């Protein structure tokens, strides 16, 4: 059975980290994978998370299975974080949530659900998008197309071309949009642009799929939900895939959620029943520890306040590194105007580096960057910024 199996190509992003880990250069720098690093270059465990874990370990009494859709308290708190208290969709009970293994798990459950109940729907992805999006939906057996998103010449959102393309999409298709901190470009729609996008999707009868992996890393927890608020109009239908890998630092706990918004309470429960069927045939039910951490923090006012300050601290450090990166590049003699990087949001920046320049940085300086030129700004520190900018200035010269 196995003797003729060929090696699969390495993952576009995680494969870079594998190469980085094997590199013996002590000065190597990894700016590829989307993991937050602090000023010391470490991925911290948040103090609010440690306190929540201590409480959980002290009070837990069993290791029983969770329900297929996860713990009710976790799901309710996820909904409140997404929509805020008292949102129309919540009071109308037309929202249903299932705990999934990370945001990736939520995306795959959406794919399985669509294949089961809406197999003719095409999933539209931004060009560019996270490298894993396409293979997730293709693996679920769905048709995938792209819409323009990035205006390289102006380093801005290509809104007109985006809307013109989606104007051709048939009703019932699903359009994946990044809730905030677009990966890989770092370019988010303005409130006015979100309204235009929401108007266009509603007019065409297209169903939004909001990939919401970075809530709190852009401008703020509520501010980053501006797109969600615009898309989730009274009577609107949509999917939301959220993740707590970044804003809680729970990368290896795999904590996420799929939230479905329907027109009625009855429809929400019907869709949830189908989602549960998909989950049962996949991973059966979700892991408990990570969701218990999130629920413990969000339910306790003091812990939540502490967590919100920690999220702000991570956001402020990322934004500070953006500014320092641009200033240091200019100091190193880079002539190109790089100030657009300061205005991007979240962990990532579309730097404009070419594949050839990225390859030189890897070979000559042990600096690892995704081939598209996407840089994880959160991987920069005060200690590596001089080395990084010196190398980038040389390959850009």
Image: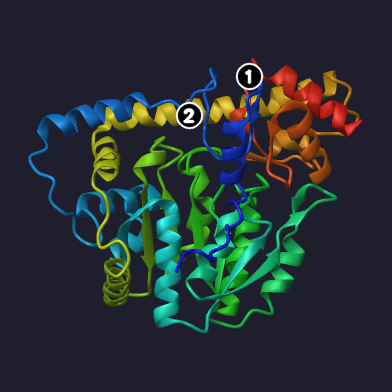
Mark 1–mark 2 distance (CA, rounded to whole Å): 31 Å
Residue 289, quarter of picture:
top left
Residue 236 seen anywhere in this rendered image of the structure? no
- Helix, strand or loop at mark 2: helix
| Residue positioned 91% across, 29% down in the render | 335
- Helix, strand or loop at mark 1: loop
Determine whether, in the image, residue 75 is placed left or right of residue 120: left
Percent across and percent down for residue 370 are 68, 43
Residue at the limit of the structure toward the top, as seen here: 383
Q: Is residue 122 above or below residue 128?
A: below
Determine whether, in the image, residue 206 is placed left or right of residue 377: left
Between 4 and 259, the one lying in front of the other is: 4
| Residue positioned 84% across, 18% down in the render | 331
Q: Is residue 169 above or below residue 292?
A: below
| Residue positioned 39% across, 53% down in the render | 83
Percent across and percent down for residue 201 are 58, 71
Percent across and percent down for residue 375 are 67, 38
Count the labels in the image.
2
Percent across and percent down for residue 29 are 65, 27
Residue 49, quarter of picture:
top left
Image quarter where the C terminus lies is top right
**Rendered image: mark on residue 304:** none
Instruction: Provide the residue designation for mark 2.
Output: 312
Dot 2 surroundings within 10 Å: few (below 14), some, or many (20 or more)? Answer: some
Instruction: Provide the residue designation for mark 1.
Output: 26
Of the two numbered discs 1 and 2 in the rendering, the one whose residue sits closer to the viewer = 1
């Amino acid at each position: 059975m196995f003797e003729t199996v060929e090696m699969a190509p390495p993952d576009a992003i995680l494969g870079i980290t594998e190469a980085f880990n094997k590199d013996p250069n002590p000065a190597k720098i990894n700016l590829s994978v989307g993991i937050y690093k602090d000023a010391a270059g470490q991925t911290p465990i948040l103090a609010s998370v440690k306190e929540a874990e201590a409480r959980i370990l002290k009070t837990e009494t069993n290791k029983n299975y969770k329900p297929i859709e996860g713990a009710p308290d976790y799901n309710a708190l996820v909904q409140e974080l997404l929509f805020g208290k008292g949102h129309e969709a919540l009071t109308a009970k037309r929202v249903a949530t299932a705990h999934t293994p990370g945001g990736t798990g939520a995306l795959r459950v959406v794919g399985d659900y669509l294949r089961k109940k809406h197999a003719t729907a095409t999933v539209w992805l931004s060009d560019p998008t996270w490298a894993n999006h396409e293979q997730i939906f293709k693996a679920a057996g769905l048709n995938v197309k792209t819409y323009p998103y990035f205006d390289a010449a102006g380093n801005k959102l290509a809104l007109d071309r985006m809307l013109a393309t989606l104007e051709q999409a048939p009703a019932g298709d699903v359009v994946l949009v990044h809730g905030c901190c677009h990966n890989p470009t770092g370019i988010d729609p303005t409130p006015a642009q979100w309204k235009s996008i929401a108007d266009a999707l509603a007019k065409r009868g297209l169903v939004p799929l909001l990939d919401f992996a970075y809530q709190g890393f852009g401008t703020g927890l509520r501010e980053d939900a501006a797109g969600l608020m615009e898309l989730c109009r009274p009577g609107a239908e949509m999917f939301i895939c959220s993740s707590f890998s970044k804003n809680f630092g729970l990368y290896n706990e795999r904590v996420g959620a799929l939230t479905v918004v329907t027109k009625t309470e009855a429809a929400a429960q019907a869709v949830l029943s189908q989602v549960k069927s998909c989950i049962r045939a996949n991973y059966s039910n979700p892991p408990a520890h990570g969701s218990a951490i999130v629920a413990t923090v969000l339910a306790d006012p003091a812990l939540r306040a502490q967590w919100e300050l920690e999220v702000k601290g991570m956001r402020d450090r990322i934004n500070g590194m953006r500014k320092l990166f641009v200033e240091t590049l200019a100091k190193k003699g880079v002539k190109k105007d790089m100030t657009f990087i300061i205005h991007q949001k979240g962990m990532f920046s579309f730097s404009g580096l070419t594949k050839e320049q990225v390859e030189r940085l890897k070979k000559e300086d042990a600096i690892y960057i995704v081939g598209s030129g996407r840089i994880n700004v959160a991987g920069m520190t005060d200690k590596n910024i001089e080395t990084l900018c010196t190398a980038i200035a040389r390959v850009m010269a």
